Image (cartoon, rainbow, N blue to C red):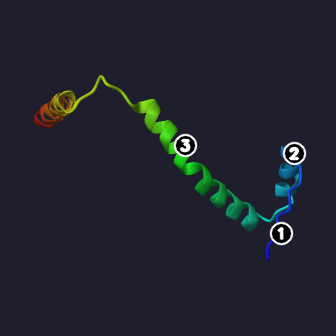
Amino acid sequence: MKTALEIDISFEQVLSIVKQLSIEEKIRLSQEIEKETLGPRMTQLLSEFRTNELDETIIDIEVEMVRKELYEKKIR
């Protein structure tokens, strides 16, 4: 049987505890935090870059322009 324990602890108290950890433990904690926050951060990042102004045709045109410029630079 498991018993859950809840305590009120401030961010400053957590930070104080983290500062007492070894480098290895801090790295492990950092990796665990990374796992917990990766999904929301990726969702936020994707939403920031989402646009209705681009479509595949516009991207293809831009790619061809850049390729042409690079090809012309090689010939010179």
Quarter of the image containing the N terminus?
Answer: bottom right
Quarter of the image containing the C terminus?
Answer: top left
Residue visible at 86% across and 62% down? 5
What is the x, y in percent for residue 21? Answer: 82, 63
Q: Nearer the viewer, residue 74 or 41?
A: 41
Please determine whether, in this image, residue 41 is positioned above or below residue 5: above
Circle on res. 41 = 3
Q: Earlier in the sequence, mark 2 or mark 3?
A: 2
**23 sits left or right of 34 in the view:** right
Farthest residue to the bottom: give it. Answer: 1
**54 sits left or right of 5 in the view:** left
Q: How many marks?
A: 3
Q: Which residue is mark 1?
A: 3
For badge 3, the amino acid type reads Arg
What is the x, y in percent for residue 16? Answer: 88, 52
Q: Nearer the viewer, residue 74 or 62?
A: 62
Alpha carbons under labels 1 and 3: distance apart: 33 Å
